[in-house]
Amino acid sequence: MINLKKAEVVSDLKRVSLRSKVRKKESYSDGPYVGNKGLKTMSAFRQRADFGAELTLPSNFHRLRCDGIRQGGPNTIKRYGTRISFDFTCSMDLLGQFSFDGNEFAAKDFGNQFHFLPSAVLHPKKVSDIAATIKHVWQMGPASGLTVAARGHGHSLQGQAQAPQGIVINMESLSGQEMQVHRGKFPYVDVPAGELWINILHECLKYGLAPKSWTDYLHLTVGGTLSNAGISGQAFRHGPQISNVHQLEVVTGKGEVVVCSEEKNADLFHAVLGGLGQFGIITRARISLEPAPKMVKWIRVLYSDFSTFARDQEYLISAENTFDYIEGLVIVNKTGLINNWRASFNPEDPEQANQFVSDGRTLFCLELTKNFNPDEATKTNKEIKSLLSQLSYIPSTLFVTEVSYVEFLDRVHAAELKLRSKGLWELPHPWLNLLVPRSKIHSFAEGVFGSILTDTNNGPVLVYPVNKSKWDNRTSFVTPEEDIFYLVAFLPHAVPSSTENNGLQHLLSINKRILNFCEAAHLGVKQYLPYYTTQEEWRSHYGPRWEVFVQRKSAYDPLAILAPGQRIFQKAISIL
């Protein structure tokens, strides 16, 4: 057992000194990690502190590797926070390891707007590593300021997976665990939460199966999307990804490992789905599967009138026989739109398509797919023709292509590779995702598209409806109350040094204007991937469900250890 008493943690960290009295003669070894297989380890963070420590080492203790516990270590961690004092007692068996150097990746995310370094990063080998770490922080009690955040593939937008002065858990360290596909009448796959959806797709396809519901981008972790919702063009039929989960394994804010489902520990199951990491860290999930198609017919058509566009979308998501994927885009003042499409799509009428001009116009693109196998091509073409005959798009703008199922689902990654090659991927992404009630979508469109939003050259703007009946109100996710609501997603990238329309501050101001408009017009909008800075805003976001949210927090993470980057609950700290 190692006892470290009354350690003072200071925000500006430069050195660590350890004064220790070792009762059993052992040797120390410096190294970049704390926590190696089979070793009792001390959760020691590179800090400026004076430890009055008494170390009692077990007889089978061979060596203690403590990087940063030596005087004047060369690498320091910038910390953000206040002075904290705590009684510190821990003893952990870890198969994984802590890293104290080279953790800059844990202070970055896709949004690229917030950068807070943690004190340490845990690279777990087993779920028990995560449980032991959280349990240790829990046992430290409210006297400790340590918090813990789970990080997947780093696709958060506003620092939600960061832990200033805390511990970040690198969930991708668990991705090497085996995925288990189960066939049968109700097929499913058991996966570690750090696994990427693209890898799950490839594994399931070996059995002719695939998950039912997706996100547009598949290089995200299971735990990350299930902690939010996971939504794409299949959601109108299957619901979001959180509606397609049979079972979860969760580590709560007390360090307890709990298996939960609709039948067992149901409250925790529903709490963590869409729970923004507030009630537990998802470590494993059982995902519903369906037979996978081989091919996809991918279709795009344009509208000049939003009312007609929305009417056709709502018709398609309500029809019994319809497309398999339905999304839409807003296009404002886009030059050469049709010519850009020709690189991947074929116009139904090339001559008419040549005459279409998009410059200076606000247009609405309906994007559709129909899944099929090669021996079903003739039947599928007839079904598509019948469905399109019910729509009122601009005839000259019908474009169609045929791709493999994998190529369609992984389409955003193909765009990512192009952007990375131009240095345009790791830019700030001031995204704004909104859920707009059906009854208010026309007011929203009139006030935002072509008015506040004067062009879409900095990134796509998605708009498409989903059926509320496919969402489970028992989860932590909140939606508008109407039977149909729209996802409207503004997905720009910013040039940090620019003061023009592509500059970060300009794009953030556009987001603010949109939110102010929604509030002033009383549209009843909810944020998806929400970002708020005060608890009053969070209370308003959850509305009548706030009380349940708080009760669940008290039950599963009463010290507010988990997911500090969401800025919902602040960890209470007792000063000794």
Image (cartoon, grey):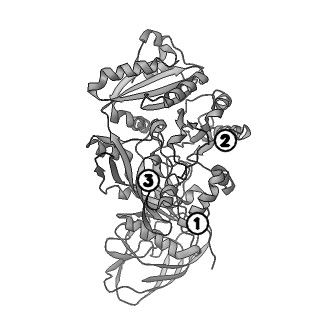
Q: Which numbered disc covers residue 223? A: 3
The quadrant of the image that shows the N terminus is bottom left
The number of callouts visible is 3
Tell me which amino acid carries mark 3: Gly
Q: Name the residue under label 1.
A: 554
Q: Name the residue under label 2.
A: 524
In the image, residue 516 lies at what x, y percent? 70, 40
Instruction: Please tell me which residue lies in front, 181 or 124.
Output: 181
Query: Tag 1, which secondary structure?
Result: helix
Q: In the rendered structure, which disc, 3 or 2, sits on the residue that comes first in sequence?
A: 3
Instruction: Please tell me which residue lies in front, 288 or 357.
Output: 288
The residues bearing labels 3 and 2 have C-alpha atoms spaced at a distance of 29 Å
Tell me which amino acid carries mark 1: Ser
Circles 3 and 2, Cβ within 8 Å, touching? The answer is: no
Circle 3 or circle 2, nearest the eye: 2
Q: Is residue 154 visible?
A: no
Residue at the far top: name it.
351
Query: Tag 3, which secondary structure?
Result: helix
Q: Is residue 247 above or below residue 234?
A: below
The residues bearing labels 3 and 1 have C-alpha atoms spaced at a distance of 22 Å
The quadrant of the image that shows the C terminus is bottom right
In the image, residue 466 lies at what x, y percent? 53, 36
